[in-house]
Amino acid sequence: MGLFSKLKEALKKTKNSLAAKLTDLFSRNKLGDEFYEDLEEILISSDVSVLTAEEIVEEIKERAIGEKCRDKEYVISLLKEALYDKLTAAEPLEIETPAVLMVVGVNGVGKTTTIGKLANLFVKDDFTVTVAAADTFRAAASEQLSVWGDRAGVRVVKHAEGADPSAVVYDAVRSVKAKETDILIIDTAGRLHVKANLMEELKKMDRVVNREYPEANFYKLIVLDASTGQNAFNQVAAFKDDVGLDGIILTKLDGTAKGGFVISLCGELEVPVCYVGTGEKIDDIEVFDAEEFVDGLFE
């Protein structure tokens, strides 16, 4: 199954909800103020933020009025263009080696599983990969990561439970430098973005990487559970302020009808989506493609 079919399947719930509402809208209303008000409400109901929904509808309205167009298909094409523009507001992330990827996020979003999938994806692209098990607080976290590491065929650097996460990162950095490994992926403990002491721990790991491996390209990626919808805004904003963010990895997109939050997240916070989890298996992760995402909402 290719990227488009996997992403299309993951977006099925969001697409079905959006398509049904748009069909109903076009059957009820001609283009006019009421139509655009209803269109805005439909976007918001798909978890697009109020601000982004207003901006999208205003852009469509201006273009449709300016071009004196009342054709349904043309309005849909304008909507797709506007959604694509929001999704590409931030420059797409291109990972260059040697690379260090520090993966962050709140509890329960699927970081460890995502790291296993990501490692496997890089190995399939002929990169050498090491994973640092710097989540030393969750019981059996390193063992779970080791299982995924075995599946992906990558080394996992780990310490005893309760060890200093920065010490794990330090040893992992020394290892990848010695072995000239292409990519180091750092797993981190899930943390609430309101806990200052846990954010300080991330900053410490950040300093270790910058001090010990300045020649590496260092990226910070946040894993988001798509079903959290607009609540993801606070998560991204907090992590971006404290440690900086280079990209987003979406998980559980197939389990929600509110995938529209991604559009406002990219447009307003200007952090690009890099990868999307499309299922439970190790191969179920794909590089994000904004055009295919938008197509998946309508086709």
Image (cartoon, rainbow, N blue to C red):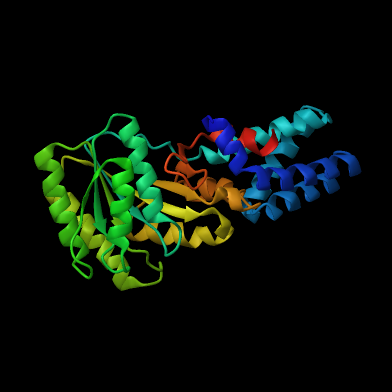
Instruction: Give me the residue at 73% from left, 48% from top.
Output: 17
Looking at the figure, which quarter contains the C terminus? top right
The mark total stands at 0
Query: Residue 114, position in %: x, y?
Result: 40, 49
Q: Nearer the viewer, residue 173 or 133?
A: 133
Q: Is residue 246 visible?
A: no
116 left or right, relative to 61 = left
In the rendered image of this protein, does residue 235 appear above or below residue 128?
Answer: below
Q: Nearer the viewer, residue 110 or 238?
A: 110
Name the side, left or right, on which 106 lies relative to 183: right
Single out the residue that lies furthest toward the left. 178
Depth check: give the residue in front, 124 or 217: 124
Q: Residue at x 79, y 44 (%)?
A: 20
Residue 137 lies in what quarter of the image?
Answer: bottom left
Q: Residue at x 15, y 48 (%)?
A: 173
Q: Position of residue 30 (x, y in %)?
A: 89, 39
Percent coordinates x, y for residue 95 in the rendering: 32, 36
Q: Using residue 155 as the reference point, say whether residue 83 is left or right of it.
A: right
Q: Quadrant of the N terminus?
A: top right
Above or below — where is 23 with respect to 159? above
In the rendered image, residue 113, in percent from the top left (x then y), is placed at: 40, 52
